[in-house]
């Protein structure tokens, strides 16, 4: 790895990635126990992408993604208790239990969802960037999609407008190689997602999304570009999801050897741990402290998610419309 | 045009005559003047001054930051508008016609309408989608489609469809100030019509969700919205000549529907005819019929009758198009039938 990082930063990165991993593992368990229902898309394997990108953001920046969103939320600093309680459909969840796994938001952390319609988050993210530019707040928007969403027409409608108006948006294609059960080879003619902005003059680059420091370096280039008024940027993150598309997917469309090979050779957390140990001389004890801390945070989140009550029956009818007329 | 910031507001009793087109433009101009976060986005809204000239003069008055020409990309710019609203702005998204909103309907329903609920009340989407809706004249099936019942079906949206210039102005202002997504259905054939009911008071705003009794009568209630209000009023004139006093209710808002005003009228007339230019199946008239069953059943002396467009895609031929749309004679006939008069 070419780039350097301080011990303190490294421990935080390790913490943040491990938190996502352990959180998602417990989500899978809770799903198996029937405490989480419906659609639940796990982020395991892709942790370096969100943690890396988040590390270069400023407080006014906005983040939006699709339905594989738990990792993004934790990376944004949202409370694991609130996220887990949303998964269990409880009042303590970020959406009071009314959104579920795919629909969570945090105004406080500038996380704008959490969208269940593949690709719909991309024009919305472009609109968030439009708002940054309009307000002149020097913010940028990170709009993430999978390789599957990257074939939706509205993505290209967005590329066009973003390039036309030089909007401060970074389109992140998290290429985990499968849109549900269809591999990129079977879904995409010329699957160089990073190059798909060329027609509009949008710079794109392909990044090893399993290598934290590579993600950070690329994200910094992209964010600097967008923040300086030069317009959109595309980052294709070469990554991999270890689990099926959702909890109901046994992932029979790929071989066990393929998955195990990635886990063994490219796992982002293992690789980062090796880097810390070799280059920063971080000790096993320091790592254990982080691991214990993460374990505690996740256990606390699970406990909260199990014990937080279901929403009151009256919540069925609230939040359909905002009734007050704002006077600005 | 009322663009001057220093213009002294006139009392709202002072009413002016202007076209619906000008009234809509003035509504946008006044709200843009009032609130910097309001901007207009759509195809041909800026340099072309609007495909139907509704945004005439706005680019000159407010500049290209706030009056934004988009590429022809409805799905994309509707979604961009939703994102801008999430990001703290108040977009007015113009569809050149609402026919093209079908390209964007996922963003309108799934993103704009549902996100407040899905976020447990955190998000909110203060956005107006506006443009001409329904049949114009001789533009065929794909350009003559009324979306009133489509959008009125969906919780999380408000749906407004004004008739007069004064209502168009005061309700568009309300829509822009509303913290929710509002579908604002205009009518191309009304754009050029003048009405002398336009308030010049920039603070004159009508509440969304209130119908207006445009003509009082005791024998039969006629409900209509948008251009069909004019047809209903014409029909009422004709009915009066035959001794039937029709009460004409301009619904103005389709969601939330002002059921109370309709019920109050039916309690008096005991008969109701619903008029709309859209298709009959699962239309606004179907909803009104159901509401009357639920809320005014004991007051009805005749079944609810719906006057609607014919249940076919809009034909191009002049004679067929005429037949496909509700005409004054259809309304007269329907009103007589519920009064058991021939």
Image (spheres, helix red, strand yellow):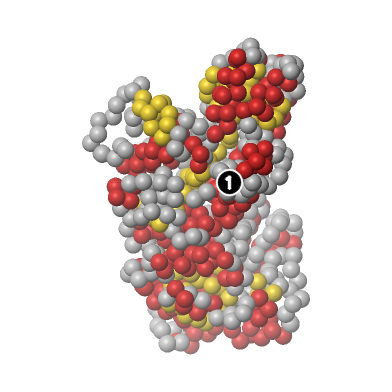
Q: In x, y percent, where is residue B327?
A: 63, 31
Q: In x, y percent, where is residue A31?
A: 71, 60
Q: In x, y percent, where is residue A89?
A: 65, 50
Q: Is residue A197 above or below residue B313?
A: below
Of A189 and B141, nearer the camera is B141
Residue at (35%, 27%) from the top-left corner? Answer: B16
- The reply to whether residue B108 is visible in this rendering is no
Residue at (29%, 26%) from the top-left corner? Answer: B10
Looking at the rendered structure, the secondary structure element under dot 1 is loop
Disc 1 sits on a residue from what chain?
Answer: B
Residue identifier under label 1: B138
Residue at (35%, 42%) from the top-left corner? Answer: B29
Of A298 and A325, nearer the camera is A325
**If the image is split into quadrants, where does the C terminus of chain A sit?**
top left
Quarter of image, res B195: top left
Q: Is residue B114 above or below residue A127?
A: above
Of B173 and B52, nearer the camera is B52
Q: How many marks?
A: 1
Residue at (69%, 16%) from the top-left corner? Answer: B270
In the shown orientation, is residue B31 left or right of residue B80? left
**Label 1 Cα crowd, 10 Å radius (few <14 / some 14-19 / many 20+):** some
Q: In x, y percent, where is residue A87?
A: 64, 55
Q: Is residue B11 above or below residue A241?
A: above
Of A59 and A129, nearer the camera is A129
């Amino acid at each position: 790895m070419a780039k350097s990082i301080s011990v303190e930063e490294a421990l935080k990165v390790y913490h943040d990635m491990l938190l996502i991993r352990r959180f998602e593992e417990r989500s899978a368990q809770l799903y198996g126990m029937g405490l989480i229902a419906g659609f639940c898309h796990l982020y395991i394997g892709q942790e370096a992408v969100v943690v890396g990108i988040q590390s270069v953001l400023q407080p006014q920046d906005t983040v939006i993604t699709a339905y594989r969103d738990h990792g993004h939320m934790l990376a944004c600093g949202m409370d694991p208790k609130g996220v887990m309680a949303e998964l269990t459909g409880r009042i303590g969840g970020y959406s009071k239990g009314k959104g579920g796994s795919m629909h969570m938001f945090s105004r406080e952390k500038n996380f704008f969802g959490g969208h269940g319609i593949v690709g719909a988050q991309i024009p919305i993210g472009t609109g968030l960037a439009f708002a940054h530019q309009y307000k002149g707040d020097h913010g940028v928007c990170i709009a993430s999609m999978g390789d599957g969403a990257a074939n939706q027409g509205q993505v290209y409608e967005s590329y066009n407008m973003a390039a036309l108006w030089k909007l401060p948006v970074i389109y992140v294609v998290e290429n985990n190689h499968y849109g549900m059960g269809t591999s990129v080879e079977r879904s995409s003619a010329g699957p160089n997602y990073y190059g798909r902005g060329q027609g509009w003059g949008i710079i794109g680059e392909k990044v090893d999304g399993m290598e934290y420091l590579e993600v950070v370096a690329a994200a910094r280039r992209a964010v600097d570009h967008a923040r300086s008024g030069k317009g959109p940027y595309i980052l294709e993150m070469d990554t991999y999801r270890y689990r099926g598309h959702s909890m109901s997917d046994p992932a029979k469309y790929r071989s066990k050897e393929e998955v195990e090979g990635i886990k063994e050779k490219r796992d982002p957390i293992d690789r980062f741990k090796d880097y810390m140990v070799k280059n920063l001389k971080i000790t096993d004890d320091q790592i254990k402290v982080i691991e214990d801390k993460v374990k505690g945070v996740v256990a606390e989140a699970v406990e909260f998610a199990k014990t937080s009550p279901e929403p009151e029956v009256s919540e069925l009818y609230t939040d359909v419309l905002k009734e007050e007329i704002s006077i600005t | 045009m009322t663009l001057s910031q220093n213009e002294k507001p006139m009392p709202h009793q002072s009413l002016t005559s202007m076209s619906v087109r000008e009234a809509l433009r003035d509504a946008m101009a006044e709200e843009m003047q009032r609130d910097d976060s309001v901007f207009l986005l759509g195809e041909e809204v800026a340099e072309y001054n609007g495909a139907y000239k509704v945004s005439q003069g706005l680019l000159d008055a407010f500049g290209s930051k706030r009056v934004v020409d988009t590429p022809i990309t409805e799905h994309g710019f509707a979604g961009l508008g939703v994102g801008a609203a999430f990001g703290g702005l108040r977009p007015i998204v113009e569809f050149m016609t609402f026919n093209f909103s079908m390209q964007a309907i996922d963003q309108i329903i799934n993103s704009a309408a549902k996100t407040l609920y899905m976020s447990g009340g955190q998000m909110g989407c203060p956005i107006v989608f506006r443009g001409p809706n329904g049949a114009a004249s001789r533009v065929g099936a794909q350009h003559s489609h009324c979306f009133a019942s489509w959008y009125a079906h969906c919780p999380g949206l408000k749906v407004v469809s004004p008739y007069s210039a004064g209502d168009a102005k005061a309700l568009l202002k309300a829509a822009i100030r509303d913290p929710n997504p509002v579908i604002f259905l205009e009518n191309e054939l009304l754009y050029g019509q003048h009405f002398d009911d336009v308030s010049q008071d920039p603070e004159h705003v009508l509440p969304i969700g209130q119908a207006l009794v445009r003509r009082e009568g005791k024998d039969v209630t006629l409900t209509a919205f948008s251009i069909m209000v004019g047809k209903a009023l014409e029909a009422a004139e004709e009915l009066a000549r035959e001794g039937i006093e029709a009460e004409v209710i301009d619904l103005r808002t389709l969601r939330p529907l002002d059921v109370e005003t309709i019920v109050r009228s039916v309690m008096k007339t005991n008969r109701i005819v619903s008029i709309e230019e859209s298709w009959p199946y699962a239309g606004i008239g179907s909803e009104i019929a159901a509401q009357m069953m639920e809320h005014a059943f004991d007051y009805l002396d005749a079944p609810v009758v719906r006057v609607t467009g014919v249940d076919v895609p809009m034909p191009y031929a002049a004679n067929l198009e005429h037949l496909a749309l509700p005409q004054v004679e259809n309304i007269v006939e329907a009103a007589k039938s519920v009064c058991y008069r021939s």
